[in-house]
Amino acid sequence: MNYLVILIAIFVVYRSYRLFFAPDEWDKTKVKESFQKDTKVIIFTAYDLKFSTKPYVTKNKEILQKYADIHGHEYKMVIDYDNDISPYWLRVKVLKELLENTKDGSIIAYFDADAVPSHMDVSITDFISSLKSSADIFISEDPDIEWNPVYPGVFNTGVFFCRNSPRSRDFVNQWFSMYKPEGWIKDSSNKWTCKFPCLYAGENYEQGAFSKLYKSSDKNLIQRLNYTTLACSKSSSKCFALHLMGASDIKRDMIFEDMLKK
């Protein structure tokens, strides 16, 4: 019983910390046109061929392409036809390659296939400018850490933005070096599974690896955002990226369909 009381007390302290010291929420009303129209922005998604045929994924592509066209960004849908790397790590591999082939100052923006900009009228450059940060990597906490203080995947890698610089390239190179092919199994249906024992969002996943690397990284490199900013499940003035993680494919398809009608 005493242990239960101690655990409850620890959780209360943690929740109080989250309430008063959590990263600030983004506010759309603070966005002003940055006039960074000449900044190259590449938006990309990355998945295997089988995954790319899902209806909501097709609609995701349409929304991201529409958004890119509005703001003069470039959109790339990267399909891993060979399926030779864990799909969780594919985004890191592609990010590394894009950083190697673009100029310093360019911005690479990753969106999962179930994530889209919540405010089509705000460019990624203006979003970053509104943060008034000297960071080069912009990423939200994962919603799960709101209730789970020991959740290993502190950050949600379903949406993140990376400004090309020597220090961001160094970070991404270290991040990708944490991928362990021997820690993954691809079955006869081409489905990838993390080898047991393997905790979801732990170090074998890109999410847990990012969180571990963050602990030893330059904190000025990474802008840590509230989960309501890039990992929100409902649109609001505090939500820049709508991320429908955990939602059914049918619900994702319906929401994306509604967005395309607007």
Image (tube, rainbow, N blue to C red):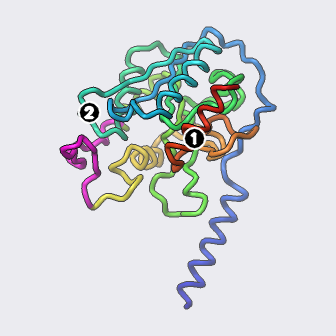
Mark 1 residue crowding within 10 angstroms, few (<14) / some (14–19) / many (20+):
many
Real-space Cα distance between discs 1 and 2? 24 Å
- Along the line of sight, the residue nearer the viewer: 65 or 54: 54
Residue 200 placement, left or right of 232: left
> In this picture, is 179 found above or below 92?
below
Q: Residue at x 47, y 24 (%)?
A: 44
Q: Quadrant of the N terminus?
A: bottom right
Q: Residue type at mark 2: give it.
A: Asn
Asked which secondary structure carries label 2, the reply is loop
The residues colored magenta run 176-196
Sequence-wise, the earlier of marks 1 and 2 is 2
User: Is residue 96 positioned above or below 242 on the image?
Assistant: above
The residue labelled by disc 2 is 83
Q: Which residue is mark 1?
A: 243
What residue is shown at x 57% (from left), y 47% (from top)?
141
Residue 95, disc: none
The residue closer to the viewer here, 21 or 84, is 84
Nearest the eye: 140 or 188: 188
Query: Cβ–Cβ below 8 Å for labels 1 and 2?
Result: no
Residue found at the far right of this picture: 29
Residue 209 percent location from the top left of the image:
39, 46
Q: Is residue 247 above or below residue 134?
A: below
Residue 163 picture location, percent across and down: 53, 24
| Residue drawn at point x = 67 percent, y = 26 percent | 261
Q: Find residue 237 and report its image quarter.
A: top right
Indicate the secondary structure of the residue bearing disc 1: strand
What type is the residue that disc 1 sits on? His
Spot occupied by residue 97 in the image (x, y as percentages of width and height)? 36, 22
* In the displayed structure image, the side of residue 140 where residue 182 appears, left or right: left
